[in-house]
Amino acid sequence: NEIYANGLKNIKPSISFHPLEWEAQAKEVLPADSFGYVWGSAGLRETDDNNRAAFRKWAILPSRLVKSGFPNLKTTLFGEEYNYPIAIAPVGVQRIFHPDAEIAAATAARKQAVTYTLSSASSTSIEDVAKANDSGSRWFQLYWPSNKHHDITASLLQRAKAAGYKVLVVTLDTYILGWRPSDLCNAFNPFLRPDNIGVELGFTDPVFRRQFRERHHKEVEEDMGTAAAEWARTIFPGTSHSWEDLQLLRKHWDGPIVLKGIQTVQDAQRAVKAGMQGIVVSNHGGRQQDGGIGSLDVLPEIAEATKDKLEIIFDSGVRSGADIAKALALGAKMILIGRPYVYGLAIGGEAGVSHVLRSLLGDLELTLHLAGIPSVSPEVLNDSVLRRIAS
Ligand code: FNR
């Protein structure tokens, strides 16, 4: 209504309402290497393509003469009620997309009442993001340092807890960065560039700072290049942890722990066995491993096997209200939005992120309303509203 009322006064929105055009608008304003970093996927982009193709295999069947108002979008996870079934996915180094970086995105998330997930590759500190998001809902994502740096892991978790982050999201698919031709062609690794991104989250960590001082006999600020490279090696250690290691995290985090990057039933069941509270069915938006399956393609079997035992969150390839509805219907309770909000951040800072969130939520609301689906609760929004139309 607000948008069409403005149209009567000849005021047209400056940011597109077509989700696929956000990418093109971001490309216009970003330097080529920053754009390549957000757009980039692994290898031939097959996983990324499969993420999108997976949504087109399902169609929403509408029910008519359902007398209901606008749908109730509230969802419950870990015993808490969330206003909306979408959250901001963790995305690192936001300073390469906009000078206001994570502060802009975390402020927009607070204003739109959407949960913000802070990345451990953030270019803003845990505490500063918490300040911008004070009354908001926030989760903390861990890129998990190797066991020899367990004191740094413990420090990050303790800081996140003290700053009001409620859920720990542990990313399992990124112990080393994927083969991304766009970044290789631009010779661009943002984590090695303290000048434009700061990787402040690491630089502000007291344990990392102390150890740097002991190793080099100088402060982080006196050799930002070396500090950036060491922080990058800390959070991307090059080798994976084991399932047993998860118990180390439990000692430092008493809230819900969610494993991000799950793509098989077997791993989802291992997460249950390891006592985890949730999983993110995700392939990192196809950025890590090429030749992979669409994330939505594996969601139904994983949900079927484990949704009564832990909370299922989903991401990779979500671009519209219908996409969100399909992932919810196939068993997820919360959907993480990745590239779309980063494009919004690039285009318009805080206002751009707000625009993308409001746009996706408006689209979701009308999609459900017009399909006669009164709420996102799993009793109502489940696979009975979908038909599989392609294999
Ligand atoms: C990411 N992603 C990511 N994930 C994570 O756990 N920690 C991180 O720091 C980052 N950083 C990051 C940077 C950029 C530029 C992108 C695009 C993505 C992955 C992200 O959380 C999410 O899994 C995907 O973005 C979901 O796929 P779509 O929505 O982008 O297709």
Image: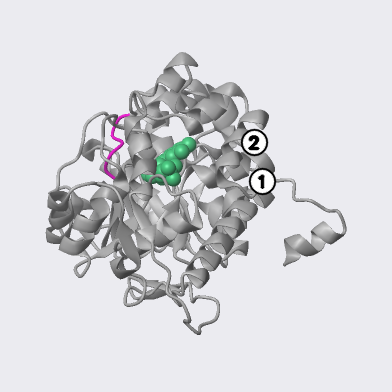
Most extreme residue toward the bottom, as rendered? 67
Task: Let me know if residue 219 appears in the view.
Answer: no
Disc 1 secondary structure class: loop
Mark 1 or mark 2, earlier in chain: 1
> Is 178 placed above or below 377 here?
above
Determine crowd level at label 1: few under 14, some 14-19, many 20+ residues with C-alpha closer than 10 A: some
Mark 2 — residue?
25
Ligand 1 within 8 A of label 2's CB? Answer: no
For the N terminus, which image quadrant? Answer: bottom right
Residues 317 and 56: in front is: 56
Q: Does the magenta stretch include residue 329?
A: no
CB-based contact (under 8 Å), mark 1 and mark 2: yes
Residues 139 and 56: in front is: 56
The label number, if any, that marks residue 290 in the structure image: none
- Residue segment shown in magenta: 171-176
Q: Residue at x 49, y 29 (%)?
A: 37
Disc 2 secondary structure class: helix
Three-letter residue code for mark 2: Gln
Q: Where is residue 25 in the image (x, y as percent from the top left)?
A: 64, 36
Residue 360 horizontal side relative to residue 202, left or right: right
Residues 246 and 294: in front is: 294
Determine crowd level at label 2: few under 14, some 14-19, many 20+ residues with C-alpha closer than 10 A: some
The label number, if any, that marks residue 16 in the structure image: 1
Q: Residue at x 40, y 30 (%)?
A: 41
Three-letter residue code for mark 1: Ser
Task: Let me know if residue 191 appears in the view.
Answer: yes
